[in-house]
Image: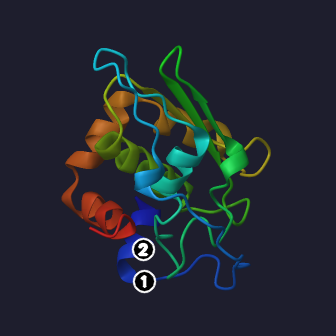
Amino acid sequence: KNAAMAAIQGRKINANPIVYQAESTRGIGDRKDTDDEDTPEPFDSLEIFDLIRNINDPEHPLTLEQLRVAKLDDIHVDNKHNRIRIEFTPTIPHCSMATLIGLSIRVKLLRSLPPRFKVDIAISPGTHNQERAVNKQLNDKERVAAALENDNLLNVVNKCLGC
């Protein structure tokens, strides 16, 4: 809650993050469609990265890609078992925005992917002081649902998503 309030009030926890150059994207038109209507279309890591790379950081006017919070190499897609695992790296080990960033990633994927996918979101191992607690919150359906019932928090998430 404190992180959401800090974001709402415009306070910055990491005032001077390192900013990286964005990589090239693959257009939506480059998606490989299957001819079989009964076969679900496979996704790959780059498609998932394209969905989350432009999520705005709640604290800075920069994207998760520009801050290297989200990286292509940290996205794993298993089409056979309909699973996606995303790890993200907060800019500092005590980032209070980590839960909000993970929630923004989850909401973007909930809104963008077919419901067949089970999505696991986690902080990259060893990059955050509260890694276990944040990971537990991000992957608990009831906690996520409760968070999204909070209008102020949902407004912050939507702002991160550019909505």
Q: Amino acid at mark 1?
A: Gly
Mark 1 secondary-structure assignment: loop
> In this image, 41 relative to 93: left or right?
left
| Pointer 2 residue | 7
Residue 111 horizontal/vertical position (percent): 29, 45
Q: Residues within 10 Å of mark 1 (few under 14, many from 20)?
A: few
Q: Please state if 56 lies on the left or on the right of 123 as rendered.
A: left
Mark 1 touches mark 2? (CB < 8 Å): yes
Q: In the rendered view, tell whether residue 80 sits above or below residue 23.
A: above
**Left or right of 108 on screen, residue 152:** left
Quarter of image, res 26: bottom right
The quadrant of the image that shows the N terminus is: bottom left
Residue at image position (71%, 51%) is 128
Label 2 SS:
helix
**Amino acid at pointer 2:** Ala
Q: How many marks?
A: 2
Q: In 3D space, how far apart are the residues under numbered discs 1 and 2 (Cα atoms)?
A: 5 Å
What residue sits 41% from the left and 53% below the top? 29
